[in-house]
Amino acid sequence: MPADAKLSHTAAMILQAIHAGHIYGFSVMQMTGLPSGTVYPAMRRLERDGLIVSKWEQQSIADTEQRPPRKYYRLTRTGRTTLEAAWVRYPLLEKMIPTPVMERA
Amino acid sequence: MKRDELVTIFACANVRVASLLVPRANRAAWRAEWDAEIYHLRRASAAELSDSPGTTPLEFSRGAFPDAWWLCRDHLRSHGASAWQAGSAGRCVATLTALMGAALILCMILPGARRSLLPLFPSQAADLVTISPAGYAGAESPGISLQQYQEWQTNTQKLFSELAWYHPTVKNVVLAHESTARLSIGLASANFFRLLRVQVPDQASGGAGPTLVLTRSAWRTLYRSDPRIVGQSATIDGKSVLVAVLHDDSPRLPGAMQGWLFQDHAALRQLSPHARGFAFARIRDAAFPPARSGVRIMLETRWGITHVFDCVSISWLTWQPTSNFLFALLLACLALPATTALPLGDYPRYRGRMVFRITVRRWSFLVLKLLLLVAAVYLATIALGRGPAWAGSTSVFLQVGAAFPALLFGFRWALQDQRRRCPECLRQLSSPARVGQASCNFLSWNGTELFCIRGHGLLHIPELPTSWFSTQRWLCLDSSWRCLFPENCAPSPEMI
């Protein structure tokens, strides 16, 4: 997927949420207010297009906390470029889901 | 059991059911992700952290269905696309199936070819024969005159127990509430259906006057299966006839008749004695010795000239196109080793489950390809030989003459295509490269090298077969080589 590709508002919100540090599917749902039936397919699509990547957390961490391991998502370099393009298109995106840096500012 | 636990059980059951849609390779990981998310959702709910919509485990798990459905669709789309890529086995099979389908449609469109594929009569008695001028058995054009039929009725009683005849013609049929229709009608002798042992409709057997018996297909297509016209009167050539409809589509007779009008002796006499038609008879076995090929010869001398007629058994006529094709198939099989090498090459022995996965699939593909090819050629040659109204012998020559080269070149292509495919993924090999020098043939190997685009291996084809390298060899590459090949070197996205 080209970095300057236009994202839908939903996809841009999900990218912004992941960028803001909400790296699990459920936390993306909480942050964006979107239902699970929208968030998860959208994240699969973003992953397929190379805008985000997923990884399983280490089993040892999950074992220590006595819970199942979770899958987390991160932006790729292409995803970051695409998100920067989306900020121009959706100027309120950063205000809706502020990144930790912005919050500090 | 607490309500929360019950809800969680239902939520996990939802995820289990939805996981059936997920491709098997990703299913376990997909389920683990959803189970983990449900666990954390429960924990968040218990801590009353969640205030967003869709946060009870049951509501949350409903999202598993769209997610699983999206994965399923994406998998089908990507794998479906790879099956249709140029050179893939799926595309090859689909092309052959399409060819076979086109030939079948052609056979269904051409009446003569359709009749060759479908049975002629509901019951094909061995003593039922069609009489035609020599070499024209099964032809679409009528060859027996009314005069000949009438004379044979009296002077061939020792040969035939019963004789029937019909003359194909086109008539305007006027029904009371329908527009005038122009139908192909067979003016048949009164005993025609009795001789063929075709069940006569009740209206026709009542003896209430002349009856027009429509074929089932004509009733369906021309009168839209209107039940009101059955038993109604119609007008043909100014005469009133009763309309009846046959119980089924049989018999399929030459001339593609849409209806039958039975004529008694007096009515037949009104036709021209030179009117030509088709004759059928029941033969007496005692008079006609059983012939090996199903064809009996009848000689008739008239005004010092001897005329030869073929009395061809209906069952033989039905089987003839297939037997002609089988003959061409036998010839092609015999000629094949003389025109191309039969060995498919040396392949390494796969072990364990790989034997089933690779060897069986490779052979199944070859067998399927050959079967589709044979079926396509069979149907195409039936359409060519039986579709147009050729004379009987011309039809046979055309069918065998077309089937033999088509089968021979088809088999050659199937073998050559099989040799140029990867034994693992069955895709066509690409990028042929010359290796070695022809001048060094005595001391080292030279020939052509091809590779599988997915990196399964290399195929070496010797330029000159030698005692140490007589046939092509397949060299398997293990998975460590895969990243060098074009289809496997998609770079992983870089994390930031």
Image (cartoon, coloured by chain):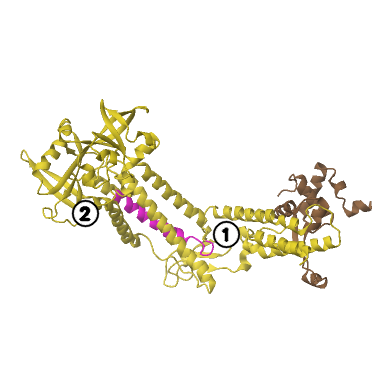
Chain colours: A brown, B yellow
Q: Which residues are magenta?
A: B399-425
Residue at numbered disc 1: B453
* Residue B399 placement, left or right of B269: right
User: Label 2: chain?
Assistant: B
Disc 1 residue crowd, few under 14, some 14–19, many 20+, Cα 10 Å: many
Across and down, in percent, residue A14 comes to 78, 51
- Looking at the picture, tell me which residue is in the foreground, B88 or A35: A35
Across and down, in percent, residue B391 comes to 24, 43
Residue B140: quarter of image: top left
Give the structural element (helix, strand or loop) at label 1.
loop
Specify whether residue B228 is painted magenta.
no
- Looking at the picture, tell me which residue is in the foreground, B444 or B410: B410
Residue at numbered disc 2: B126
* Residue B373 placement, left or right of B10: left
Specify whether residue B412 is painted magenta.
yes
* Residue B63 placement, left or right of B243: right
Residue shown at 75%/54% (left/top)? A36
Mark 1 on the same chain as mark 2? yes
Q: Where B270 falls versus B292 (above or below)? A: above
User: Label 1: chain?
Assistant: B
Instruction: State the predominant SS element of the stretch in magenta.
Output: helix
Q: Nearer the viewer, mark 1 or mark 2?
A: 2
The reply to whether callout 1 and callout 2 are in contact (CB within 8 Å) is: no
Residue B53 visible in rendering: yes
